[in-house]
Amino acid sequence: MKFVACPLVVRPQKLELPPYALLSELVTKANMTTPKTILITGASGLVGQSLSTALMARGHSVRTLSRSDRGDYQWDVASGHLDPRALDGVDVVIHLAGESVAQSWTDAAKARILDSRVASTRLLVDLILAQEKRPAYIAASGISYYGIVRERPVDESSDSGKGFLAEVTRQWEGAAQALTEADVRTVFLRTGIVLSVKGGALAKMLTAFKLGVGGCIGDGQQNMSWISLPDLVSVYVFAVENVALHGAVNAVAPEPVTNSMFTKKLGKVLGRPTVFPLPASLVKILFGEMGKETLLSDLSVLPKSLTDLGFEWQQAELEIALKETLS
Ligand SMILES: NC(=O)c1ccc[n+]([C@@H]2O[C@H](COP(=O)([O-])OP(=O)(O)OC[C@H]3O[C@@H](n4cnc5c(N)ncnc54)[C@H](OP(=O)(O)O)[C@@H]3O)[C@@H](O)[C@H]2O)c1
């Protein structure tokens, strides 16, 4: 902290400033908590890749648990195998792994979406409880916990809603209940639509918009609760470093928008027309139940826990978030 204040009070001719890289490293270290050892599941995915980089930049040590040998440690959820050494000396477990939701929801796919989350959570919970020093547990979850359509804004105190994804998130969070009962710090990040060009909803919309055939989905009146990828990564870092954060936490930007507003802003940022709507009836024909629960869902979700704890969004406004994401 002394170092940060130094350039403001020492006369310039006497000050030998360190190179910029060293300066920023010292400032970062001055602002951070004790370095932790963190195990991340699903680290190869969209969120996990950016999060691993961000945690290491803040001086934390990251190890990964994967189905493939690209991870530092391996697991096989279906057979119940998890390398027990993965948790040796770990302070925080971050559980991101889960079968992608963006696929046709056949019975087999639905079983994979549910089982990959619930069974994997049970494996982690059993191993955490077996540790002498139990690590904190931070897990991805979804705003679909609140259902498909809600007439009023919801926050973390709201009840759960209807639909397949709501059931998945209830069971996903519920599988970690034993940790809460054992006084292990648990955080469930109920994540909104993540803005990224590398994956997720925005990446899928871009092709149509760039070709000039983008437009509203349905009547465009449904609310979309979104978050930029850098802000989501910061929420995870905040959850690692801020022990006051626990329980359900809505990981969304403070201002949800209607699909019509989202479409308008995206068209503006891309400089493309947005006059080709995708009717709700066509969404249901093309994407079935998955389309109804994702593209047509109407959720205005408020990040009350993060706001109460003073979390600061870098991209709280949609147009800025879209510009920076697409730049
Ligand atoms: N992106 C979003 O908009 C969004 C919104 C709400 C919630 N979330 C949740 O946040 C978490 C991270 O999201 P993401 O976008 O980074 O996901 P992602 O890119 O799909 O990556 C998920 C990772 O999970 C592992 N995985 C995939 N299928 C699996 C299976 N059947 N069994 C076990 N592991 C499997 C893979 O890692 P390995 O191959 O290394 O094992 C994969 O890289 C997910 O659980 C997702 O549901 C995301």
Image (cartoon, rainbow, N blue to C red):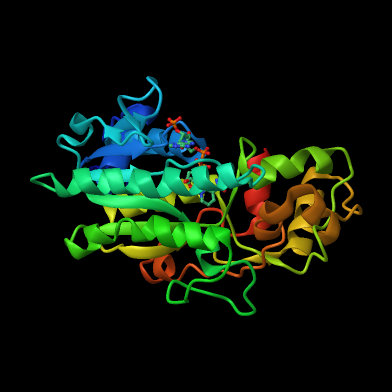
Q: Choose between 271 and 101: the one closer to the eye.
A: 101
Q: Is residue 52 above or below residue 92?
A: above
How far from the left and from the top, in percent, is residue 7?
Answer: 31, 42
Residue 179 visible at all: yes
Q: Is residue 148 left or right of residue 275?
A: left
The image quarter containing residue 76 is top left
How far from the left and from the top, in percent, is residue 126?
Answer: 22, 47
Q: Which residue occupies 58% across, 64% down?
A: 163
Please identify the residue farthest to the left as the structure is shown: 132
Q: Choose between 274 and 70: the one closer to the eye.
A: 70
Q: Which residue occupies 29% across, 37% down?
A: 39
Please identify the residue farthest to the top as the structure is shown: 69
Count the marks: 0
Q: Is residue 290 left or right of residue 24?
A: right
The image quarter containing residue 172 is bottom left
Q: Which residue occupies 36% across, 46% down?
A: 119
Please identify the residue farthest to the bottom as the structure is shown: 152
Q: Which residue occupies 66% across, 47% down?
A: 201
How far from the left and from the top, in percent, is residue 165?
Answer: 55, 58
Quarter of the image that includes the C terminus = top right
How far from the left and from the top, in percent, is residue 153?
Answer: 58, 76
Q: Is residue 74 above or below residue 187?
A: above
Residue 135 visible at all: no
Q: Is residue 178 left or right of residue 231?
A: left
Q: Is residue 244 left or right of residue 212?
A: left
